[in-house]
Amino acid sequence: MLLGINGVYKVEETSRGWPEINIALNPQKLLQYRISPQEVINSLVLNEGPFFSGVINYFNQQLTLSTTKMPNNIKDLSNFTISVKSENSQYIPLTLSSIASIKSQNPPLIKDAKVSGYKHALIMDILSQSKANEVKVSKELQKVVETIKERLPSTINLIKIYDLSDLIKSNLNDVWIALIIGSIIALVVVMLFIGRIDGAFSVFIVVPLSLSLTFIALYLLGFGLNIMTLGGICASIGAMIDHAIVIIERGLQGITGDIQDRMTGVFKRLKDILLPMSLATITSTVVFIPLIFLPGTLGLLFKHMAIAIIIALISSQFIALTFTPILSIMLAYRKTKNSNKTKNRHLYFMFSHTLIFFMRRPWISIIVLFIVATIGYISFKNLPTAFLPKWDEGLISVPFRTPVGSSVKTTTKVGEFLMNEASKNPNVKRVSLMVGRGFGNSFSTPNKAIMMIVLKENRKESTQKVMLELDKKFKTLAPNLISLNSSQVMVNRLGDLSGSHAPLEVFLFGSNPDQLFKEGQKIYKILSKNKDFEAVTYKSPSAGPEIEFNPSYFATINNMNSKNISDTIKLYFWGENAGYLLKGEQLFPIRITLQNKPQTTKELESLDIIHNDKPMSLNMLSNINVKTSVPYITHQNLVPYSYIWLKPYAHVGLTTAASSIENIIKHMNLPHDISYSIGGYYKQQTKSFQNMYLILTIALFILLILFGFQFSSQKCAIAAIIAISSTASFSLLSLLVTKVDLDSTAFLGILLVFAIAVNNIILIFSRSRQLNSKHSHKSVALATRSRLKPIIMTMSADIVGFLPLAIGIGRGTDLLQPLAIATIGGLIFGAFASLILAPSLFSLFSIVKKK
């Protein structure tokens, strides 16, 4: 039923296993009747029906012919007859009960599951398809679950342990709230600047229209609403408000005279602004196109955000070209009051003097750039780095390993002990345990287990804080564990996507597994004492112990090979499947084993192996070696390697931690035939940072080319590029001040600042070109002065619009918080860069060119 739900990819169950029928053969009886276990297995399999034998027409009916029905109880199975060849070559019937004991039992314990509050449990992992809407799949799943509940006996409870769609819905709600609050605050700021309620109301109308068009475009292109697409829309709200402000403010600017004069003025001003504004939007859009082609995990995450931003910008520009001018014309019918005229005059007077001061002394811009670059460099060097932001899921994954050789039963007991401790935490809602498997692995060694901790929605502490508290308690209560690492579930999933499973991984490569094991142990002990790391795990010693059988010379002369010996030993300790027993609607697997299973190594040595109707002891047929542990050395590209997982403390960046590891290993003087590499999320971070550096560089290069064409002046283009680039320093400074890590989303915030600054600077130099085709000092100064109020207005609206995301309203905005903080920091300096620095640099390059 579950696999029949549209969008469900896989259903995996974890439990002790289904009950089965055990047929324990008596070795002495087999020897007496000269019958082998394989003959019993073959007989059962060949007689397990029903077998289709055709159809027969009988009068008006068609009857199906069926041979041998499947046994439906132990009694039928006991009376099952096997043909045995006697000494006179005749076949005699032999009932199964005469050579074996038959009973119902639990299967060998290779996996187990536990859920807090219940004695027994069967856990089902339901995985959705890659492009399926998880929220929609969850709703359909819930309907099916309710149907199943109605059919279950009252003694069986079907409960939901965790649902990632709840996390998605909660995060989406938080982002929606931040989006709405940010938009309202931004519109209030616009109203204060414009000084007209109808003007602010016009902006209030335009933004929802642009959003609606964006949603329609995303739907038609097959993109759903998720955290990344909504994040892209949040990031674009500033541009939407900017587009509305530019047109409405330009239309209302200097409205005087009668209605005819006002209308003529509006048309002229709109005609002057629409073309440069369209070019500015196209240029801003181009900045985000490289993000679509980002490779790896970062590409999977940010592709949707980049597409959402591009669609939002184009949608907003379409509304700006079609609907907003109509509103601007309608507003022109009513005169603007001059209550703020004196204040505006004072503002423009102060700004004009400041601008002229900088343009007449352009060398000051060099000092400013040096200071800004220094701030950026210091901030960058002191910022902790991370691959992605930390966010609060409310789900904690705790994989752990008991000592090598531990059974499933022992590992389960340890897991239950940790579950009880986790359940005492007031923030914890439910705890579940899976032994003998993990996320993404259906089977693993018996000493491996994974615990899932679900936190309450109204918890008082963050997931990170709860995780650290429980981690310390777990390690205190179970100090003998080989490893115990806690992480949030989405982080675990990203690890599966990227191929990394820890913040830092040290890989040792070499040709000798034993040597790798020893050197790995040395590095592990040194790194464990380092104060930068919260957790260090050596991943090699995870297999064994084992008993090894090597066929002896005696086995060879008796025509016994490894397979013969293995098959007999397997029948004692594991068994062979021999079909199924049908009971009602349930199938019980039939397992064939041999009686009198040895319990000690001495009994094992004296075990009789029957071959050609002769019993021979196992210690004669093979050399028996007991190994206490087997180093678990895996291979990468056919080269053996061992590896260490490391988790640095929150205040230690991945780059700093990686440098510390590099220095330690370099001073260890590893053997010449052993090499090492450092990977993990750090490797993904390094790749993502390199990609983002490349994208920022490409974006600036594209802007330089586009500016050259738009301004017909390389002086303007270079001045614009330098001014735009300088905003990155204050984005980094804002992250340092707020103690937020530099990650991939922060880089996206820097790119967003570039796009907004581009829009402002293009409109300044485009206006300058309208005043003077050759861009004189006077035309640039006048154009900058005319853009003072719109730029301050849009920058202020953008900054307050991003505040809800930067503050972190709800837990769902955590992923976008670094983006918002970086954007706000860049925008604060962006106003100065657009209004003062860019014109001052233009003056500097004009003087240099004349000389």
Image: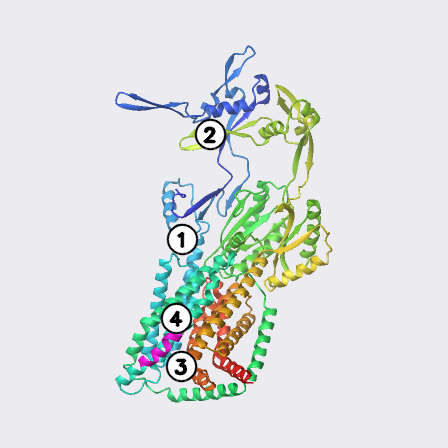
- Residue in the image at 58% along x and 61% along y: 686
Real-space Cα separation, disc 4 to disc 3, in angstroms: 25 Å
Visible residue check, residue 236: yes
Give coordinates of residue 605: x percent, y percent. Answer: 68, 28
Q: Which residue is mark 2?
A: 580
Q: Which residue is mark 4?
A: 240
Name the amino acid type tagged 3: Gln
Q: Quick one: label 1 or label 3, which is nearer the N terminus?
A: 1
Name the amino acid type tagged 4: Met
Q: Quick one: label 4 or label 3, which is nearer the N terminus?
A: 4
Name the amino acid type tagged 1: Asn
Q: Which mark is residue 770?
A: 3
Magenta stretch: includes residue 202: no
Classify 621 as above or below 747: above
Real-space Cα separation, disc 2 to disc 1, in angstroms: 39 Å
Real-space Cα separation, disc 4 to disc 1, in angstroms: 28 Å
Name the amino acid type tagged 2: Tyr
Q: Which residue is mark 1?
A: 133
Q: Nearer the viewer, mark 1 or mark 3?
A: 3
Classify 223 as above or below 121: below
Q: Are marks 1 and 3 in contact (CB under 8 Å)?
A: no
Q: Quick one: label 2 or label 4, which is nearer the N terminus?
A: 4
Which residues, given as a range, are shown in magenta?
266-277
Give coordinates of residue 253: x percent, y percent. Answer: 35, 83
Tag 3's secondary structure?
Answer: helix
Q: Residues within 10 Å of mark 3 (few under 14, many from 20)?
A: few
Query: What secondary structure is the stretch in magenta mostly built from?
Result: helix
Q: Residues within 10 Å of mark 1 (few under 14, many from 20)?
A: some
